[in-house]
Amino acid sequence: MAFAHRSVEAGLAGAVVGPDHPTDGSQRLPRPWLWLSLAAAVLAAAGSVVGLWAPEAVYGEETAALADSAAAQDLVNLVLVAPLMAATALAASRGSLRSWLCLVGFQGFTVYNYAIYAFSIHFGPLFLLWVAVLGLSLFALIGTLAALDSAAVRARFIRRSMALPGSFLVAVASLFVLLWLSEIVPDLAAGRPSRSARDWNVPTNPVHVLDLAFFLPAVVVSGVLLIRRHPLGMVTAAGQLVWLALTCLPILATVFVADARGREAGWGLLAPIGVLCAVTVAVLLGFLRRVRA
C-alpha cells in the first residue's frame, strides 16, 4: 500500500512551517478548510493508534502482505502525515504560503490512502472512521485548492526556470506508470489475476487504479504546467512533490514491519526507494525556496 524517519519529518516541517508569513495577510487558509484538515488529521491519528494497538481486531482477516502494509501505513500516518497536515493547516491559516502549498500534498496523500483503507480492508471496527477521514480530507483538499489565488501565488515566486522540478515530476510519474504496466500487461496477456492483487486477496490492486486513473496523470499535468510557468503548476507542484515523497515512506516502513513479524522482508527496496524519497525531498526544498518570504 502506498499506504519514516524523524529526520525527514524535521526537514519537511522546517520547510513548510518556517518563517513565511506575509505582513498583509492576503493569503490565509479559510477557517472551514482549516477545521476539516484538523478533523481529518485527528481522526486519522486516532485510527492509526487503534490499528497499531489492536492489529488482529482491525486487520485480522487480511493477508500477511496487506496487514504488514497497513501497519506500515499506520506508522507513517501517526508519526508524520497527521502531525504535519495539522501543522501546515495551522500555519497556512496564519498566512504561510509555503505551508498552504504543501498542505495540498498531505491532504491528497490522506485521500489516496483512506480510499484504499475504505475499499480494500475488510469491513470492521474502523470502517466509519476511515470513511470519515476520506470525506473530510477530500473536501478539505478541494476547498484548499479552490481558495488559493493562483495569480497571487505566481507573483510570490522568484523568476527562475521551473524546468528542473517540473521535469522531475513528469519523469517520476512516467517511471511509476511504466513500473505498474510492467506487471499489469503481462498478467492481462497471460489471462491470469493480478499478482499484486492476489497477494492482498483483493479483486484488483487499488494502488494501480488510483495511480493510473488519477494521481500519476495529475502529477504529469502539474509538471508540464510548471515547466511552462503556468500558475496552476506553481499552485500544485509542491503538493505533488509532498505526495511522491510520502508514498515512499510506507514502502520503506513495510520492510521493517515484515522483518519484525518474522516474514520475508524486501530489503532490496530500501536503496532505490530511499534514494527516490531523498531526491524528492531535495527537489521540494529547492522549489519552496523559490517562494518569496
Image: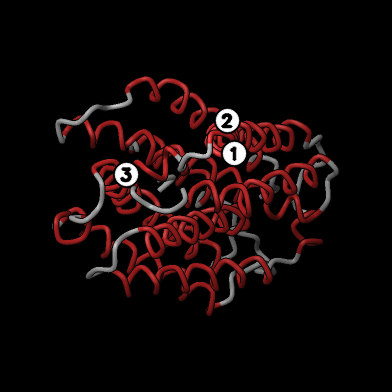
Look at the picture and state if 34 lies above or below 269: below
Residue sitting at the far front: 191
- Percent across and percent down for residue 273 are 46, 28
Res 288 visible = yes
User: Who's the residue at 59% across and 70% down the image?
Assistant: 29
Q: Which mark is residue 69?
A: 3
Within the image, what quadrant is residue 248 found in? top left
Q: Position of residue 211 (x, y in %)?
A: 57, 48
Quadrant housing residue 11: top left
Q: Which residue is mark 1?
A: 284
Q: Quadrant of the N terminus?
A: top left
Judging depth in this view, the residue of 151 and 205 nearest the camera is 205
Mark-to-mark CA distance, 1 and 3: 26 Å
Q: Secondary structure at mark 3?
A: helix
Q: Residue furthest bottom?
A: 32
Name the residue located 41 percent from the left edge and 69 percent from the top edge. 38
Q: Secondary structure at mark 1?
A: helix
Please report whichever mark, 3 or 2, sits nearer to the chain's N-terminal start: 3
Q: Which residue is mark 2?
A: 182
- Between the C-alphas of marks 3 and 2, the distance is 21 Å
State which tag comes first along the sequence, 1 or 3: 3
Please, is residue 212 above or below residue 137 in the view?
above
Q: Mark 1 belongs to which amino acid?
A: Leu
Q: Is residue 281 visible?
A: no
For this rendering, which residue is in front, 131 or 93? Answer: 131
